[in-house]
Image (cartoon, helix red, strand yellow):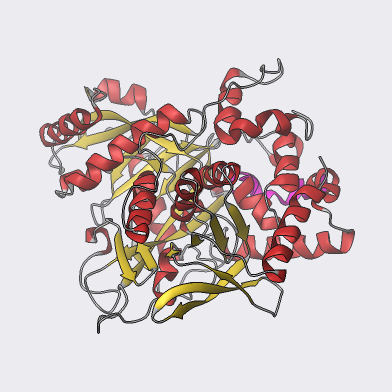
Amino acid sequence: MSAINQVGRRNSLLKELRDNTHSFDVVVIGGGITGAGIAREAAGSGLNALLVEQKDFAWGTSSRSSKMVHGGLRYLGSGQYRLTRDAVKERQRMMTEAPGLIEPLRFIMPHFQRQFPSPRLFQILLRVYDWIAHSRSRHLLTPGETMQWVPGLSTRKLTGASGFTDAVTDDARLVQRVITEARQDGARCLNYVKAMNVLRTNGNVSGIELQAEDETEMFTVNTPLVINATGVWADRLQQPVDGQNPMSIRPLRGSHLVIPWQKLPVSCSVSLLHPDDKRPVFAFPWAGTTVLGTTDLDHTENLDNEPHIAAAEVDYLLRISNSLFPGATIARSDVLSTWAGVRPVVTAESSGSGSKAPSKESREHEFREDNGLISIAGGKLTTFRLIAREALVRGLGSEERLRPVIDPVFRQIAPPQRPTNISHRNWQRLVGFYGSDLNELLQAGPAEPVYDQRVSGPVPGELLWAEVIWACKQEDVKHLDDLMLRRTRIGLVVPEGGKALLPTIKEHCLGALGWNDEQWQTEEARYLTLWREAYSLPNRPEQ
């Protein structure tokens, strides 16, 4: 396959939309997991759907989450039973439909003397959690068993631990896979196209004006239904309805540190209560590294800029790692990278932030309806399918036009025969990540590992060059950061954002991207600047 496929598809679709005014049953704004899920359900139901994203697919919260596909045990503890029930059921469904993309992960919650919650109370919560899932995963561990699960954990006042099972994913890859499924059912999906204005006729939505990146002219598509799934930007397209202001969104930032696995080797997710505020913080294995996160605080910066971790958040996360893993002595110099995401939490307080602690805000999603404009904010990664279906039902007026609720999100495929040089574990990951595209992906480039000890350090990842080249050819890579931070995670798991790998990536990918040397140099400089500003440690402590 040639680079014409990606570039040509995009240019052809943009030209088609510009040259002739097209009509769609639904236009979805926002290319995160919620928007991708809506496009998937709409196209799977036979609706003519268009999805547009102002930046890259999964650029916002959906590539910067904590990667957990879970039922939200702490939400159950705060009485949000419905949210937990729906999430647990969706977690089970996703693990069944897409193994390798959504993987079970053991969670360990250590218990210490005089610390809330007690082992007895936590086991009661886990009993309900297991009952909802119709399976038992809970286990009460002795101090000795806890140390076998979590070597290096502090033994000071340790009384044991509770174990249970949830799941983990690569959130950006999850979005990409859902978009692929939507496209296979006819959805048209474009990144770097911004929704400028919602058009109305007699007060009802009749179309939308769009503008592609680097272009000055707008173009219009007709539609009676626009679903605004833009997360923290959801209030921008809304207008007051019946004297009520748009939903009040409280942007909350969650930041993470990425540590070399060799420095903090954990084989499960360790849930820890931070000594400062008693919030749950996790240390978990991901993509060959160990991740520490997350924080939870108001994000007051410009939402159009890349969010980044603050020095106080770095200190917060290092403090708990060194208090719970004293032998590891994690320092700033050990951090490979960082990421920060902004959650679109709907608050009852009109100012968008208030006296309620960020962690006390509900994670339930909410809708606002305005004569054909459906806006969504809040919600969880795990429940994206339920949110998508609810949005469409609200927009269409009934569930009759939607496909059966039991229909899968991810098509079941018969994978090609596993090449002998790819491990069983990596093969399962590839099947989960790419689904029906896997056979063509393997023909796109060499099935050889990207990570070379000489240039990338001891990164125990499984990424193949075929995946990198496939992304460049077929997955809407418009900028180098799309490739380095979302289609692959090289920029997060390799020191200095993968700077040492860039010459080799250029050698493999320049032709696949259809770029010349000058364009590569521009993109490389852009990416490295972005990485330093948003994905590395802050240069100096805040004053």
Question: Residue 336 vs residue 358: left or right?
Answer: right
- Comparing 322 with 519, the one in front is 519
Question: Residue 123 vs residue 347: left or right?
Answer: left
Q: Is residue 490 magenta?
A: yes
- Which residue does the image show at 58% across and 28% down from the upper left? 431
Q: How many marks?
A: 0
Picture quadrant of residue 138? top left
Residue furthest toward the right? 517
The magenta segment is: 488-504
x then y, percent, for residue 19: 72, 70
Q: Is residue 399 magenta?
A: no
The quarter of the picture where the N terminus appears is top right
x then y, percent, for residue 198: 48, 76
Q: Is residue 184 above or below residue 448?
A: below
Q: Is residue 46 visible?
A: yes
- Comparing 518 with 175, the one in front is 175
Question: Residue 20 vs residue 505: left or right?
Answer: left
Q: Is residue 460 visible?
A: no
Picture quadrant of residue 18? bottom right
- Which residue does the image show at 63% across and 36% down from the upper left? 459
- Which residue does the image show at 39% across and 76% down from the upper left? 238
Q: Is residue 276 above or below residue 162?
A: below
Q: Main secondary structure of the magenta part?
A: helix
x then y, percent, for residue 519: 83, 63
The quarter of the picture where the C terminus appears is bottom left
x then y, percent, for residue 36: 50, 51
